[in-house]
Image (cartoon, helix red, strand yellow):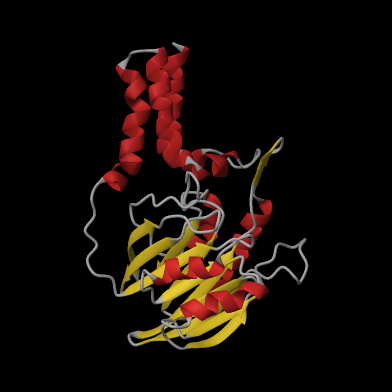
Amino acid sequence: MPILYAAVVAATVIAGHRLVPNTVGHLGSLIEAFLPWSVVIVPVLLALRRSWLVLLPLLAWLITFGSYVLPHHAGTPDLIVVQHNVSDENPDPGGTARALLAEHPDLVGLEEVLPENVPAYASVLDAELPFHTVQGTVALWSRYPLVGAAAIDIRPHDLGADWNRGLRAVAQAPSGEIAVYVAHLPSVRIGATGFGSGRRDESARKLGTLVGADATSRLLVIGDLNTTVYDRGLRPITRTLTASPADFALTWPASAPVARIDQVLARSMTVTRLTALPRTGSDHRPLVAGIRF
């Protein structure tokens, strides 16, 4: 009977993960960060007990994620966006830039861009994307002119002014202006006290406030947000943006990806497809998004 109870609890958590409280160790966020992998409990339970009740978690998972494994026909995108945390330990920034440019993107958002590596990225990307801005360790390359480029303050309260991991610029595309945010939210840690996401959540709230107050109709958030879109910690950002397409597109860690913590989110536009590219010199894989107006 304990196995059957475990199956019922697992199915309930998968289907009703938003009901899991976040008050102790950010348990709800921890579950949501790895929610797609909840299906692995099914073979474990089947190995312990053969019963149709053990399949309840599989049913809950299929209801939640079944559409993710179906083929999608997104059509030709109006805009191609690449997001990549290039890593501050990347041994080959030029090679990384060439891999990104091979997708013929219109916009490229980068994180962990060291000042000494900017020329290497620019020497490759500028050939097709002649407009760029670098603010702190985040950068944006664009096919279209950029105006109003500036750093944004998404720092957690306990970090100093040298922590600069966000920017906003307006891309003047032929179809109209697009406000583009590039952000790198703080990392999370799993320790004795649970899921340490306090800094990331605070930074997400600040970014969400900026995005929510932005009067530009078309808007993009590109970045390493250090969690998946299922995590309620990103709710301050995602609540004003359209849902991501039904696609896993795992980006981290690059050697054996288990989660998509890199995101391309849109407002007044639709992200129709997401694709994770082969690994570069980074510990993340690049993410390519097709967007329709």
Image quadrant containing the C terminus: bottom left
The location of residue 163, given as percent across then percent down, is 72, 68
Residue 116 relative to residue 16: left or right: right
Rendered image quadrant of residue 276: bottom left
Q: Position of residue 69 (x, y in %)?
A: 29, 44
Question: Toward the viewer: 48 or 285?
Answer: 285
Residue 187 seen in render? yes
Q: Is residue 268 above or below residue 43?
A: below
Which sits in the foreground, 231 or 274?
Answer: 274
Q: Residue visible at 62% across and 42% down? A: 26
Q: Is residue 52 left or right of residue 122?
A: left
As displayed, is residue 150 above or below residue 210?
below
Residue 44 in percent (x, y) is at 43, 21
Quadrant containing the N terminus in the rendered view:
top left
Residue at image coords 47%, 78%: 125
In the image, residue 266 lies at what x, y percent? 41, 68
The residue closer to the viewer here, 48 or 251, is 251
Q: Residue at x 40, y 37 (%)?
A: 15
